[in-house]
């Protein structure tokens, strides 16, 4: 019933735009609309939804048995390796649609060319924003799944820090965190756990390596947990030993930016103002040139999904919004500090913080 209701919402929105059918290709969107989760890799997978409500799920043949358990789909079409997806679409979808919705961002150039050749007279329109809006408004149940995942992350990080020692390599701590995630009850890591020490913490997208963490280092940990298909995302930054006054100042600046962004997360406010609340504070403290990324993003069944919280997004905060808030300062030669939380705007318009691990400066 849950997935049927989600598809009904999509069908209603398609009807309002006179779109007679949609081909949903993103694996995350397919999972959201059907409950079927799979990574097809290079193989074709899609959900065909017609205006009359009928649905067809195309899956690689190797997923046929698994997909057979999906409820409420009218037809399942397995595609053997080597068979062109266009043949399966031609046979299963009937005549050429006048207007077909596709997720532009999920469509590869190859697939787009194949669809244009298959249906040369069809008008293709982007429904990515429509699907994103539906997925972006989380229910209480979805928020609770993320909250549970975040709770596992809190427990796992605390347990992993109990094993920390000076001289430990970044990858060793990351491996311990991953082990503790499973011990805590999580299905696994939501993404590759990141541990960065010392000057390497100034890399916003740095990769965990063999650097040995020593006295006086900044230690940045970015981690997430999977729970029943939903993901959490959290970053905490520590000092190894006493550290310096500059490191402490940067941490306090980022922490206050985090607080200000959360305070700005009010229903009816544009997401741009949430970004600006953090960015203006960091700028006023003299670190504006060292905050190079947006302040947050949506999350749920994917670690990054709409909406994206940056200074150009005028989308208004509404109930059901589930996003990260993650300001950071990254100074080459000194290090980087980021503090990231998962926030949910509940049905009453109140903001709930789903991540529970303390944000106060902690020395290891």
Image (tube, rainbow, N blue to C red):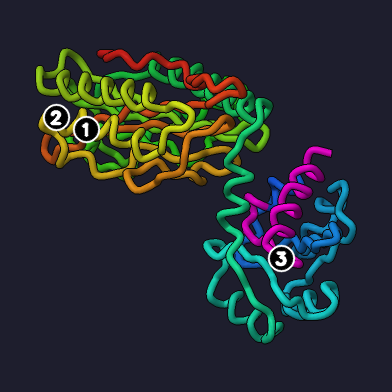
For mark 3, what is the residue? 18
For mark 1, what is the residue? 280
Q: Quadrant of residue 211?
A: top left
Of residues 107 and 152, the one nearer the viewer is 107
Residue 28: in magenta span: yes
Can you give x and y, in whole percent of width and height, for residue 205 in the image? 32, 45
- Residue shown at 43%/29% (left/top)? 234
Q: Main secondary structure of the magenta part?
A: helix
Mark 1 secondary-structure assignment:
helix
Q: Quadrant of the N terminus?
A: top right
Q: Residues within 10 Å of mark 1 (few under 14, many from 20)?
A: some
Left or right: residue 156 versus residue 331 is right
Q: Quadrant of the C terminus?
A: top left
Q: How many marks?
A: 3
Left or right: residue 241 versus residue 261 is left
Mark 3 secondary-structure assignment:
loop
Can you give x and y, in whole percent of width and height, for residue 252 in the image? 21, 19
C-alpha separation, residue under disc 2 versus residue under disc 3: 49 Å
- Residue shown at 41%/38% (left/top)? 270
C-alpha separation, residue under disc 1 versus residue under disc 2: 6 Å
Q: Residues within 10 Å of mark 3 (few under 14, many from 20)?
A: some
Q: Is residue 269 above or below residue 244?
A: below
> Are the two marked residues, 1 and 2, in contact with CB atoms closer than 8 angstroms?
yes
Upstream in the sequence, badge 3 or badge 1?
3
Q: Is residue 310 above or below residue 108?
A: above
Of residues 143 and 188, the one nearer the viewer is 143
- The numbered dot on residue 284 is 2
Can you give x and y, in whole percent of width and height, for residue 244 in the image? 11, 19
- Residue shown at 52%/31% (left/top)? 232
Q: Which residues are magenta?
A: 1-29
> Are the two marked residues, 3 and 1, in contact with CB atoms closer than 8 angstroms?
no
Can you give x and y, in whole percent of width and height, for residue 324 in the image? 44, 33
């Amino acid at each position: 019933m849950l997935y049927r209701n989600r598809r009904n919402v999509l069908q209603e929105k398609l009807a309002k735009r006179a779109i007679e059918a949609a081909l949903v290709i993103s694996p995350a969107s397919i999972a959201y609309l059907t409950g079927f989760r799979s990574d097809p890799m290079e193989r074709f997978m899609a959900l065909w939804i017609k205006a009359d409500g009928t649905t067809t799920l195309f899956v690689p043949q190797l997923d046929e048995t698994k997909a057979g358990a999906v409820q409420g789909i009218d037809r399942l079409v397995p595609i053997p390796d080597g068979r062109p997806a266009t043949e399966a679409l031609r046979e299963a979808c009937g005549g050429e649609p006048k207007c077909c919705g596709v997720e532009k961002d999920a469509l590869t150039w190859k697939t787009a060319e194949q669809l244009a050749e298959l249906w040369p007279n069809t008008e293709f329109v982007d429904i990515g924003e429509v699907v994103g809006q539906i997925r972006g408004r989380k229910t209480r149940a979805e928020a609770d799944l993320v909250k549970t995942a975040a709770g596992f992350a809190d427990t796992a990080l605390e347990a992993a820090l109990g094993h920390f020692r000076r001289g430990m390599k970044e990858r060793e701590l990351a491996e311990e965190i991953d082990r503790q995630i499973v011990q805590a009850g999580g299905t696994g890591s939501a993404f590759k756990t990141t541990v960065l020490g010392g000057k390497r913490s100034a890399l916003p997208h740095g990769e965990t390596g063999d650097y040995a963490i020593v006295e006086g280092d900044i230690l940045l940990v970015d981690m997430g947990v999977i729970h029943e298909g939903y993901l959490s995302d959290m970053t905490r930054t520590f000092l190894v030993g006493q550290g310096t006054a500059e490191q402490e100042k940067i941490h306090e600046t980022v922490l206050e930016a985090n607080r200000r962004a959360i305070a700005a997360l009010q229903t009816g406010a544009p997401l741009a103002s949430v970004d600006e609340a953090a960015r203006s504070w960091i700028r006023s403290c003299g670190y504006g040139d060292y905050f190079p990324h947006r302040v947050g993003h949506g999350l749920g069944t994917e670690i990054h999904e709409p909406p994206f919280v940056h200074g150009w997004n005028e989308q208004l905060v509404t109930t059901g919004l589930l996003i990260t808030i993650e300001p950071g300062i990254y100074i080459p030669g000194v290090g980087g500090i980021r503090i990231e939380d998962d926030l949910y705007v509940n049905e009453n318009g109140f903001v709930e913080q789903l991540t529970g691990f303390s944000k106060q400066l902690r020395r290891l």
